[in-house]
Amino acid sequence: MTMTGPWGIPMTRTDAFSCPEDGLFRLMAWLSPSFPVGAFTWSHGVEYAVEGGQVTDRASLTAWVSWILEAGAGRVDADLLREAMTAVRADDLERLLLVAEEGDALRGTHEMAQESAAQGEAFLRAIGDCWPVPGLERWRAALKGVGRPCPYPVAVGLASALHGIPVGPVLSAFLHAMGANLISAGVRLVPLGQTDGQRALASLGPVVARAARASLERPWEDLGAAAPMVDWTSIRHETQYTRLFRS
């Protein structure tokens, strides 16, 4: 039976985006602002985008974040997360290490590399302390053994696969959390009122849905981004005189 989901996207009863209640609870906990990964300290270049005049109001903030989700780090991170989950479910350690290496190498700037690595390490530490699952420490030890940090989306994919959560909901929740964090940064930086912030977040619904669906359909060989201005704002942020955020 075919149904129409949010924003007119076709769905079926066996859709990849269905999620058991316990899995949904985990995702809401892990990707909420209260989860201790320090997401609130990073703006992914939004701070300089405001300083430089690229983001000045709700409309430009929404467009900027949408661009990141569909063509920038959101696109890359969604594919890294998906491939990490596939590798873990296949018990393919070599594949997971390759995905982690790609995720580390694809960061366009020093600050973005720090952002992903710091959140990835914090995420796995919190999962191990509070949401332990058999096999987690084996995978963590292997990642540490290669001397590279575990990118945040790879960490989320690893934990989600070990906890048996379907990939579709994980992609949607991860992209929503990324977008919500960047909107929150913009609300503080522009500044915008809370109502405008919620309007901006609401408008990201179809963007997140498209980005998640696209990742499920995209081959691994198509990994990459096309958001050079976001990288530029991150580079400029490194020497920005007054800063509230770490990226």
Image: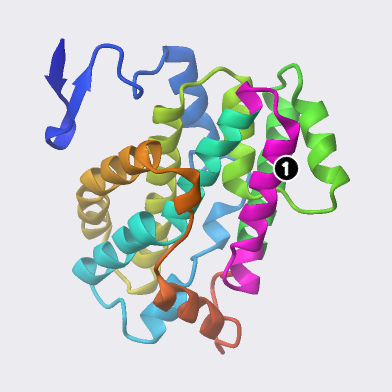
Mark 1 residue type = Leu
Going by the image, does 140 lie left or right of 110? Answer: right
Above or below for 49 versus 127:
below
Q: 204 or 87, which lies in front?
A: 87
Going by the image, does 123 lie left or right of 75? Answer: right
State the residue at coordinates (25%, 65%): 63
Residue 183 in view of the camera: no
Residue 5 image point, x, y percent = 17, 27
State the residue at coordinates (40%, 70%): 227
State the residue at coordinates (21%, 59%): 196
Considering every residue shown, the one lying at the far right of the view is 145
Above or below for 59 versus 202:
below
State the residue at coordinates (55%, 70%): 245
Q: Quadrant of residue 8?
A: top left
- The quarter of the picture where the C terminus appears is bottom right
Q: Report which residue position mark 1 lands on.
A: 97
Label the magenta part by its dominant secondary structure: helix
Question: Magenta span covers which residues?
Answer: 88-113
Above or below for 85 versus 55:
above
- The quarter of the picture where the N terminus appears is top left
Q: 238 or 12, which lies in front?
A: 12
Q: Is residue 39 magenta?
A: no
Is disc 1 placed on a helix, strand or loop?
A: helix
Going by the image, does 154 lie left or right of 78? Answer: right
Residue 241 image point, x, y percent = 56, 89
Residue 169 image point, x, y percent = 40, 28
Considering every residue shown, the one lying at the far front of the view is 221
Q: Quadrant of residue 148?
A: bottom right
Q: Is residue 110 magenta?
A: yes
